[in-house]
Amino acid sequence: MKLLAEFLEDFGADIARHTLEHILLTLIALAIALAIALPLGVYLTRCRWAKFVDVVMGLVSVIQTVPSLALIAFIVLLFAFISERGVPLPTIGVLPAVVALVLYALLPILRNTYTGIRQVDPSIIEVARGMGMTSAQILFRVELPLSLPVIMAGVRIATVWTIGVACLCALVGGGGLGDLIMRGLRSIQLGLMAAGTVPAALLAIVFDWLLGRLEAWLTPRGLRGRQSTAP
């Protein structure tokens, strides 16, 4: 307890400030990724052009295969290139960090939204259509509730990935707990490294648990019973 008290006395203020930065960075990136991936995933399930679906999924998958550090560097280079063409964009700071995080978060949300809706039993949709439901009603009252566990699994994966990759955004001045980790590595101070890595790991665990609770709350009661009795 004495060691913990000394640790918090030395690094408590820095941990609190950088943790808040990390959370804000993560939430902003996830909000933008959700705003893009969810509607796009729904649209792809309605798209009749299979090649277009393959192109979109392939493009997002390619982005995901790029190493996170290389992706951040590419965003910086892209912003620098655009700035030289007369459109001023910051090459350091929050903006390039958020863009990189959004790109990384797209795949699991988009893929799981598309897969979850496509896996809904067509006979259930036919029954809903026979009851006179409109396409929008079928989407919001049938398809999305039934595909919610799959979609939420993608959101949880994206959240954990975003929290981890956000640590690297300190390299471009994005802030967050990565600042403490980088300072600790440069000065070989174990205290600073622990002050960055431990809260980042805890954030991933806590956010994953919270999203799990949110999933359980959003899931209709009938589906909860079905999931609990599933093998």
Image (spheres, rainbow, N blue to C red):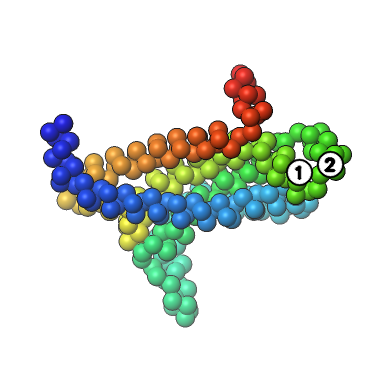
Q: Judge by depth and name the residue closer to the eye, 63 or 200.
A: 200
Q: Tell me residue 229's x, y (percent).
A: 62, 19
At 40% from the left edge and 54% from the top edge, which residue is drawn?
A: 24
- Quarter of the view holding residue 226: top right
On the image, the x and y values in percent for residue 92 come to 36, 66
User: Given contact means CB atoms under 8 Å apart, are the residues at marks 2 and 1 in contact?
Assistant: yes
Residue 68 image label? none
Task: Tell me residue 195's x, y (percent).
Answer: 24, 44
Report crowding for label 2: few under 14, some 14 to 19, many 20 or more residues within 10 A (C-alpha).
some
* Label 2 secondary element: helix
Q: Residue at x 29, y 52 (%)?
A: 18
Instruction: Name the image quarter holding the N terminus.
Output: top left
Mark 2 residue type: Arg
Q: Is residue 92 left or right of residue 151?
A: left
Type of the residue with mark 1: Ile
Give the answer, above or below, for where 209 lies relative to 57.
Answer: above
Label 2: which residue? 129
> Is 148 situated left or right of 97 in this image?
right
Against 224, is 150 above or below?
Answer: below
Q: Residue at x 45, y 35 (%)?
A: 209
Give the Cα separation between the discs numbered 2 and 1: 7 Å
Residue at image point 47% right, 60% down: 99
Which numbered marker is on residue 138?
A: 1
Give coordinates of residue 107: x percent, y percent.
Answer: 56, 47
